[in-house]
Amino acid sequence: MPLVLPDVALAPMIPVLLTLLGAVLATVLGFFLPRRSVTYVSLATLVLSAASMVWLWNQGLTAFGGSLNADNAAIAIGLVLLIGSALALIVSLDGAARARLSFPEFDAMLMFAVTGTLIIAFSGDLVTMLIGLEVMSLSGYVMATLQDSRESEEAGLKYFLLGATGSAILIFGIAFVYGATGSFNYAAIAAASSGLSVGNAPVLVAGALLLLCGFGFKVALAPFHQWTPDVYGGAPTVVSLFLSTVVKVAAFAGMLRVFSGALHNAPSWLDVLAVLTAATLIVGNLAALFQTNFKRLLAYSAVAQTGFLALTLLGRPEVGGPALTYYLLIYTITTAAALGIVAALQRTEAGFEISDMRGLYYRHPAYAVALGVCLASLAGLPPFAGFYAKYLAFQAAFQNGYTWVAVIAALMSVAAFVYYLRVAALMFMPDRTPAREYDGAHFGTRFTVALGMVGITALGILPNLAYGWVAYPGIWTQLAGT
Amino acid sequence: MIHFFIFLPMLASLLLLLVPVRWREEFAGFAAAATLGLGVWMWAVGGVPTISIAWLPAVGVTYSVGMDGVSLLMGIVTALMSFIAIIYTARRIPNPGTMLSLILAMETGLLGLYAARDLVLFYVFFEDALIPSLLMLAMFGKTHRMAALVKFGAYTLLGSMLMLVAIIGVKYLGGSPTFALSDLLAHPVKGAAQTWLYLGFLAAMAVKLPLFPLHAWLPDFHEQNHDSGVADVMGTLYKVGAYGLFRFGMTLFPDASLELRPVLMSLAAFTAVYAAWIAFRQTDWKRLLAYAGLSHMGLVGLGIFSMEPTAVTGAIYLLAFQNVYTGALFLAAGMLQERVGSLSTRVGGVMTGAPILAGVTMSLWFASIAVPGLAGFVGEFSILLGAYQVSPWLAFIAGLSTIAAAIYALSAYQTTYWQARPVGAVKLYDLQHTEWLVLGVPLAVCIAFGVWSAPALHLIQPSVSVLQLALTGGGS
């Protein structure tokens, strides 16, 4: 029997390998260098990884017989992941010491998580996806627990238990899909699912729904979202920033690959997703209305944003894919800027109360205006980028016949607007009491916030700068790698 | 040049932060005057045809702007009243930099909205005008502003979000390649879908118009705003609902407009009478003005919804000049507050202390209650004349509101400006410095266009007849 060598191609793996190198370097160099230097090294590998992705654009390379795809969809989302990771690292330069997180293991964990997220985005079959997901999740659990505090431990444990449940369900779903189609490969699943026998179809449906539940845990779709406010609210703010942006983007990348790619011919998951999306929109937005802590409010707002993001998956891939990527990019920079501001101004890791924000404009005008812009963008007000993100999401759902979900999303936007507005309005109300914030801002946070402002405004006024790159339908009709 | 007209105020608003504090007022005034000048210049050259640039080509969003008759009229009125508001702000509000900046930012939103010939662009400007007005209320409002703010924001956004879904639907169901108005008109949506989309669109416009029962934000919004009335001037400029219905609503949804005409006309007539009735009971000038404005908007709605050329022309005329005199009246209420320290309608005897303020205010009120020879009359008369041909009874009911207006306005005026001055009241001073300009210019405009309405009518009528052509073409 001749030995068949595996199809190992190095080029499409370079972005992933570079972040892995960063993770290893952070682990090793941590013994010799102070943490700041390690962070700079990590940032450098992120930049190199991004550069390699730009180089891979339009080349459509694959490795391991299609198990790893460096197609344009992977690169577009991979770049968003790298932006979010870099912003988290930059903010951590300022806040980590105060949050008692300033040791190289933080960087190592973060870089391992980034590696996992990239593997998800580049995945070409379910097993690769699962490996990426587990690498990402395990690092995430550690990051949430890394700080020596009760809240952090509780958040980490909760995240671990529910995350593990989610993974278990996901693996179960993978098994079912394999049972129904006989393959882990996205392209093979997509091919097999269009012509299934009567006996196999129910198995595939069950597998798809289990996968949906598993991913529901990971991206925080209602009713699988309960861990989110506790974890995002209890973890150190820098970690919340990372979890609510990068990890969520990666989980959505996985959903996009699996559902819009491999399973796009499979029956019935779309309607279930529509119901889950509507539930998420309602639960997330209404719960956020009643929060008094700003960090928890942002956590619930992250659940609500999940609902808007999931709207894009209801659309056909060629409309939903670019909408999802654009939304993820905007969501990442907006959330990073908002949580960066929280990290800079908070007195404790619990964030601050909404009532403490009264008159922020008169104490820290730049931060108040920036936070106002973030909130306006999250609420979807033009001319900020959040408007187009939301618009594209509505459009994707509407054009695929899910008008009712789009209408619910529109109504829930009003609830969202009310809780964002309350915070924003408080900031601009005159107030003469002494400052309640800690101005721990340094260059890193300011840089992140400034970058967020430029991005939110520029991409709001000229959305084509980002959307134009990903708007070609061809990128998104080949999600399964066919 | 049209882009400059739209974005000059926004540019000035941003630059204002860099201008030294002592020059800010002059700078803002100059920018507003330049914008007004550009508007008048465009009027002189007969408007600007629509310019269209691809904005988000993959989705079909274009940056299409144009300034034809009705847009131009509304744009010039907006520029005029923004200019007046800036002059008054500079004198009245201490450290006016932020307020001036917000006024200018809002002016861009409003001008853009009148110029927009693309539905998404219209939506963008529609929301852009919202942010500065929310900030004005948050930063300069009174004690209970939070409730007013949330109410105003929630109502407005509820409408606009439904409109956004309708906007997506209009393009997708009609099969139009872009959101530009001309493309959408070439690919109309037919049948029941049109009615649903019109209802979505109407949700946004009825909140802004405002039409009963979506009007509840309006009185609180005006009551809780700063005493000077500057924010209210911008609030009255905000009544873009009628314009949106005129420009987009009736052209894109002609069948649905006809189908819903009886209901909408009834609601509008009811709004007019109902608001006038509530205005009777008000003891706060700003609330009174808010309800008076609401009543007028009911008449405007009646005119627009009737889809009868005379009435539509009258509605646009009223819409434009109601901005002028109601805006000026809000500023006059601010001047009253500055002198007597309250906005109550029970002050008494202001006439003896400040005769010129009293006289000018009365003249403006005459414009508001449609005394012939002032601008309000032309609009209201045309609306009732046209609406009568569609529905005599509704025209009659709505007509009652003009009688009611005379009563509530004059009785409130009587108790404030006439009657006896309370013993020991503070000594009043009369109009001074720029206040002459702030009230005088709007009054002059009201008189000029009350006596000689042709220039404004020449701007309105071509657009109305184009619309009428579209309606008869689409309705048959």
Image (cartoon, rainbow, N blue to C red):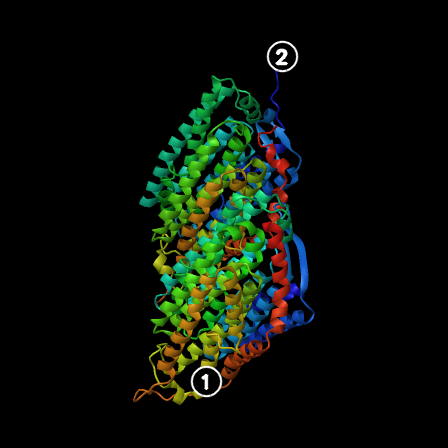
Q: Is residue A296 left or right of residue B241?
A: left
Instruction: Give the chain of mark 1.
Output: B
Residue B455 vertical position relative to residue B356 in the rendered view, above or below:
above
Is residue B180 among the parts visible in the rendering?
no
Helix, strand or loop at disc 2? Answer: loop
The kind of residue on which mark 2 rests is Pro
The foreground one among A158 and B127 is B127
Tag in front: 2 or 1: 1
| Amino acid type, mark 1 | Gly
Q: How many marks?
A: 2
Q: Residue at x 51, y 32 (%)?
A: A259
Question: Disc 2 sits on a residue from what chain?
Answer: A
Percent position (x, y) of residue A433?
34, 67
> Badge 2 local density, few (<14 within 10 Å), some, or many (20+)?
few
Question: Where does label 2 land, which residue?
Answer: A2
Q: Which residue is mark 1?
A: B359
Residue drawn at the location 62% of the way across and 73% of the way down: B454
Q: Position of residue A470 (x, y in %)?
A: 61, 42
Residue A419 image position (x, y, % from top left): 39, 54
Q: As drawn, which residue projects farthest toward the top?
A: A1
Check the image and name the residue furthest to the right: B45
> What kind of element bears circle 1?
helix
